[in-house]
Amino acid sequence: MTEFWRSEELPYLESRRSSHAISCYRPHTHDTFSIGLIDEGSSLLTGASEDAVELLAGDVILIPAGHVHACNPDRGRWRYQMIHVDQAWVAAIANDEGAHLLGEIHIFRDEFLYRLFNEANASLFRDDSGNADAVRSDLAAALLHSARGVPRRKLRPTTDSALAARLAPMLELLDRDDEGPVLDELAAMVGMSKFQLIRATRRATGLTPSAWRQNRRVTRARKMLGEGRSLADTAAELGFADQSHFHRVFRAHVAATPGAYRG
C-alpha cells in the first residue's frame, strides 16, 4: 500500500507512506533532498558502491539530491515514509551548520530525530498544510537536530565529477533525445568504445547510460504527473514506446504506478 501527499500550499514538499514485502526499487536518484523513515521491519540500503547497509525500525536516512541509492525490504514486510524537500530550501535552513548534510548520505538511529520527522510528516497527512509556517518550523527543527547529531553511518558518493564534466555533451544528448541515441554514437562523441563508455558513465554518475536516461525520464515524469498532466501525454512527451512501457519503468523507480502517483 502506498499513499502520496502534495499541496499547492507547500510546493517544495512531497511525501509518501508505503508498505512493501518484495524488492521494488532499482538504483535511482532524486532531484530533491530526501528524508526516509523506517517505521517497521528491516531493509537494505545501497548507494552507488552497492555496499548494503541494514536499516531497522526507527532509523532516519538523509539523502542529498543526485545521490544514487536503492532501499528494499530485507526480511518480510517493511513500512517506511519518505519526505522529498527542495534542496535549496534545505540548504537555506541548514546554513553552514548543516552544510555537511548535503554532501553524503547520513543514516541516524536517533529516537528523538525519528519522532521529529514522523510528527512533521503526520501533520502533512492530517492535512495541516494550511499551517505552512508550522510545517516549515517542524522540518527546520528536525534538520537542525540532524546537523548537530552524530550519524550511525555515512555513505560517500562514489561518483566522479571531473569525468562527468568530460561526459557532459554525451549526457546532454542522452537526456534530450527521446528516441534513445545509439550507444556507439554516444561513445564516439567522447572518444571511447561503447564498453569504455558504460564503465565511465557508471564511474561518473553511479548509473549506466541506459539507467541514467531512464532515471532522468522518471524524474521528469514525476514533475509532470505532479502538475496534473495525463499519463498518455507524459509517456508520449518523454518518448516511451507506449503507456505499458512507461508503467513498467516508472514502477521500477518509484514503487508505484504512474496513476497511483498522480492521484
Image (cartoon, grey):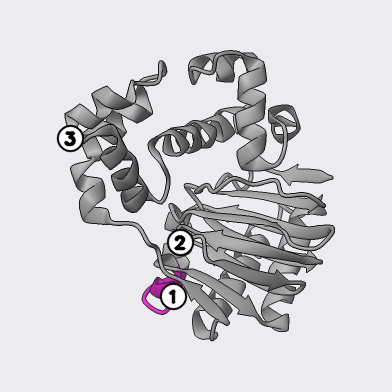
Q: Which residue is mark 1?
A: 98
Residue 60 in the image: state x and y as whole percent: 65, 71
Residue 105 in the image: state x and y as whole percent: 49, 67
Residue 40 position by quadrant: bottom right
Observer able to see residue 107 = yes
**What is the number of the mark on residue 190?**
3
**Alpha carbon of mark 2 to alpha carbon of mark 3: how far?**
24 Å
**Alpha carbon of mark 1 to alpha carbon of mark 2: how far?**
24 Å
- From the viewer's perspective, tell me whether residue 254 is left or right of residue 93: right
Give the residues drawn in magenta, as a range: 94-101
Residue 75 in the image: state x and y as whole percent: 80, 63
State whether residue 176 is above or below residue 253: above
Where, quadrant-wise, is the N terminus in this rendering? top right
Q: Which residue is mark 2?
A: 49
Residue 108 position by quadrant: bottom right
Q: Secondary structure at mark 1?
A: loop
Tell me which residue sits at (61%, 66%) in the image. Answer: 139
Q: Tell which circle, 1 or 2, labels the residue nearer the N-terminal end.
A: 2
Amino acid identity at mark 2: Ser
